[in-house]
Image: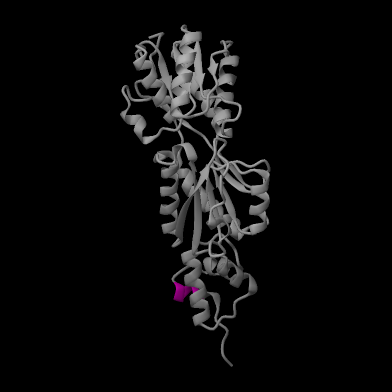
C-alpha cells in the first residue's frame, strides 16, 4: 500500500515550514503566490490529492491585467506626470507578481467622463482592470458590473460605491495647505480652481480650504471658480487680483494650474513669494523646477499604484468581501513659494 505523503514530506521537498504547507493545502490566502506554486508542485509530485479549496486558491491567480488611464481631450498632447507615476508604480508591482500589464488611454471630456469606451474594457482576454482618473457615470457602472471581472479604481469616482478604490484624502490635504498659509501669517487667502463641475478630488480640496479658513475665522470669499486648465487658471488669477488686490496668498487646486498661476503673477509684476505666496497640490516632478520652487502637498503616487495591485489581488481571492476604499493622506513639501509674514 502506497503511503499517503505527510505534511512534513511536502514541506521538506518544497523547502518551507509545515505551517505554510497547511495553509496552502487548506486554500488560505495569506501565502505568497510563488510559495503557493512551489508547495502545490511538491504536493502533486509526491502524489498528494489536492482539495477543491487548494485547487481553487491556486487557480485564482491572474497572469495579466489591463490599465486604463484618462487623457483629457483638451490635454491629450501633454504628458501627465501625476498619472504617469501611478502607471509606473503599477507596472513595477505587476513585475513582482509576474503579471503582464497592458496599458491604454481613455479620452475624457471636461467632466472627466469617457468620450468613447476603450476596447480593452470588454476584451475577454483582459481578466482584470485598473481604471485611473476617470469619472464613471451610471451607464458606465452598469456596464462594468456586467463584465463580471475584478475592477479597481485609482483616483476615479462613481455615483455608487460598488468598486474597490484607491483615493487621496483631498479634504484633509486642502485643509493642511490652507492651515500652512495661516501659520505663515496670511489672512487673505485666495483659491483658484473650484468650479462646481470640476472633478470630485478638486472639489474636495476646495472643501478642505474652506474648512480651514472657517475654523480660523478668516474670510472665505476669495475663491475664484475655474476649471483646472492652464488658460482658465491664468484668467482666474487676473480676475482674482482685480477684485481682491489685498490677498497675500493663493492655494492652487493642482500643480499644473498653480504653475500657470505663478507665471501669471510674475507677468503681472507680482513677485512670488515676496508679494503673493503660492501653494500647490500633487507634487508633480516639475514642481522642483519652478522659480521659485513650488511648495505643495505631496500625493504618494507610488503607493497608489502598489495598493491598486495589492487590492486587485485581494479582491480576486476574496470576491464576496465588502467594497474597500483607501484614502491616502498627503504630506506638505516645503520649498520656497511661501513667505512667512510673521517671521
Q: Quadrant of the C terminus?
A: top left
* Quadrant of residue 297 within the rendered picture: top left
Q: Of residues 342 and 36, which is closer to you in this image?
A: 342
**Residue at image point 49% right, 27% down:** 253
Q: Position of residue 142 (x, y in %)?
A: 68, 51
| In the depicted structure, whether residue 14 falls above or below residue 239 | below
Magenta: main secondary structure: helix
Q: Is residue 126 visible?
A: yes
Q: Residue at x 55, y 51 (%)?
A: 311
Location of the N terminus (image quadrant):
bottom right
33 up-or-down from 153: above or below: below
Q: List the single residue furthest toward the bottom.
A: 1
Rendered location of residue 280, percent (x, y): 44, 26
Q: Measured from the top left, where is residue 58 in percent x and y?
A: 56, 69
214 to 323, vertically: above or below? above
Q: Is residue 9 among what the camera can see? A: no
Give the magenta range: 9-14
Q: Residue at 50% of width from left, 58% of height from top? A: 65
Residue 44 position (above or below residue 336):
below
| Residue 69 location (% of width, % of height) | 49, 47
From the viewer's side, name the closer residue of 47 and 287: 287
> Between residues 11 and 156, which one lies in front from this camera angle?
156
* Closer to the camera in the image, 310 or 246: 246
Left or right of residue 110, residue 267 in this image: left
75 lies left or right of 320: left
Q: Is residue 46 magenta?
A: no
Q: Residue at x 52, y 77 (%)?
A: 43
- Position of 189 compared to 160: left or right? left
Amino acid at each position: 500500500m502506497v503511503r499517503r505523503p505527510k505534511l512534513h514530506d511536502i514541506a521538506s521537498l518544497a523547502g518551507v515550514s509545515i505551517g505554510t504547507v497547511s495553509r496552502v493545502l487548506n486554500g488560505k490566502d495569506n501565502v505568497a503566490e510563488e510559495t503557493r506554486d512551489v508547495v502545490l508542485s511538491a504536493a502533486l509530485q509526491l502524489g498528494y490529492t489536492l482539495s477543491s479549496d487548494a485547487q481553487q486558491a491556486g487557480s485564482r491567480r491572474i497572469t495579466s491585467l489591463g490599465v486604463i488611464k484618462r487623457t483629457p481631450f483638451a490635454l491629450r498632447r501633454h504628458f501627465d506626470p501625476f498619472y504617469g507615476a501611478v502607471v509606473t508604480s503599477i507596472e513595477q508591482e505587476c513585475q513582482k507578481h509576474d503579471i503582464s500589464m497592458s496599458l491604454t488611454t481613455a479620452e475624457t471630456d471636461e467632466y472627466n467622463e469617457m468620450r468613447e469606451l476603450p476596447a480593452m474594457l470588454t476584451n475577454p482576454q483582459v481578466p482584470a482592470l485598473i481604471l485611473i482618473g476617470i469619472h464613471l457615470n451610471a451607464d458606465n457602472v452598469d456596464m462594468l458590473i456586467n463584465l463580471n471581472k475584478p475592477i479597481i479604481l485609482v483616483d476615479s469616482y462613481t455615483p455608487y460605491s460598488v468598486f474597490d478604490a484607491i483615493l487621496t484624502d483631498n479634504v484633509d490635504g486642502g485643509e493642511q495647505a490652507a492651515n500652512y498659509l495661516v501659520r505663515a501669517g496670511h489672512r487673505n487667502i485666495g483659491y483658484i480652481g473650484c468650479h462646481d463641475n470640476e472633478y470630485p478630488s478638486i472639489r474636495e480640496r476646495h472643501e478642505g480650504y474652506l474648512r480651514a479658513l472657517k475654523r480660523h475665522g478668516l474670510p472665505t470669499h476669495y475663491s475664484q471658480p475655474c476649471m483646472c486648465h492652464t488658460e482658465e487658471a491664468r484668467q482666474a488669477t487676473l480676475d482674482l487680483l482685480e477684485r481682491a488686490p489685498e490677498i497675500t496668498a493663493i492655494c492652487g487646486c493642482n500643480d499644473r494650474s498653480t504653475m500657470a498661476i505663478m507665471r501669471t503673477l510674475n507677468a503681472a509684476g507680482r513677485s512670488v513669494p515676496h508679494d503673493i505666496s503660492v501653494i500647490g497640490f500633487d507634487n508633480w516632478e516639475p514642481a522642483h523646477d519652478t522659480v521659485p520652487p513650488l511648495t505643495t502637498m505631496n500625493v504618494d503616487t507610488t503607493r497608489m499604484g502598489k495598493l491598486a495591485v495589492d487590492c486587485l489581488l485581494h479582491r480576486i481571492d476574496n470576491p464576496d468581501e465588502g467594497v474597500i476604499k483607501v484614502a491616502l493622506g498627503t504630506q506638505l513639501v516645503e520649498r520656497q513659494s511661501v513667505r512667512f509674514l510673521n517671521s
